[in-house]
Amino acid sequence: MAGEFNVLEHELVPEHHLLSEKEAEKILKDLKLTKDQLPKIRISDPCIRALDAISGPVEEGMVVKIVRRSRTSGVSTSYRLVVRG
């Protein structure tokens, strides 16, 4: 991504973290959810494409942790399942 704009560095874009399979399994177990029950994020999403360039290959079926920070509501964490598109 040399010379390109990294969308993940923009102040209005929440933090995106790619989880390992083991981390994803633990989170899903703690939340008592299956991957299919997670909200989806497309592999073509600009944040996922930026993660792919930074963290290595992002594949369909992986889980992304999204951390939003707000002065009024503190920290909110959500999870998304990477899907085709």
Image (cartoon, rainbow, N blue to C red):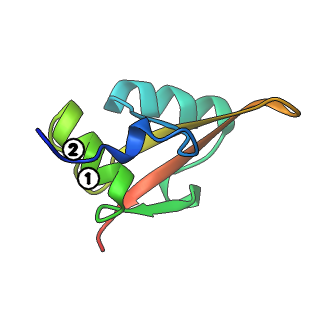
Q: Are marks 2 and 1 in contact (CB under 8 Å)?
A: yes
Q: CA distance from mark 2 to mark 1?
A: 5 Å
In this figure, which residue is indicated by the disc labeled 2?
52
Residue 53 image point, x, y percent: 17, 41
Q: Position of residue 3 (x, y in %)?
A: 14, 42
Q: Secondary structure at mark 2?
A: helix
Which of the pair 8/30 is nearer the observer? 8
The N terminus: image quadrant: top left
Q: Residue 85: image x %, image y %? A: 30, 74
Residue 83 percent location from the top left of the image: 35, 64
| Three-letter amino acid code of the residue under disc 2 | Asp
Q: Residues within 10 Å of mark 2 (few under 14, many from 20)?
A: some
Picture mark count? 2
- Nearer-the-camera pick, 50 or 37: 50
| Amino acid type indicated by mark 1 | Arg
74 to the left or right of 7: right
Q: Residues within 10 Å of mark 1 (few under 14, many from 20)?
A: some
Label placed on residue 49: 1
Q: Which residue is at a point 29% across and 69% down the rendered structure image?
A: 84
Left or right? Give the position of 69 relative to 25. Answer: right
Q: Is residue 34 left or right of residue 47?
A: right
The residue under the point 43% across, 25% down is 23
Q: Residue furthest bottom?
A: 85
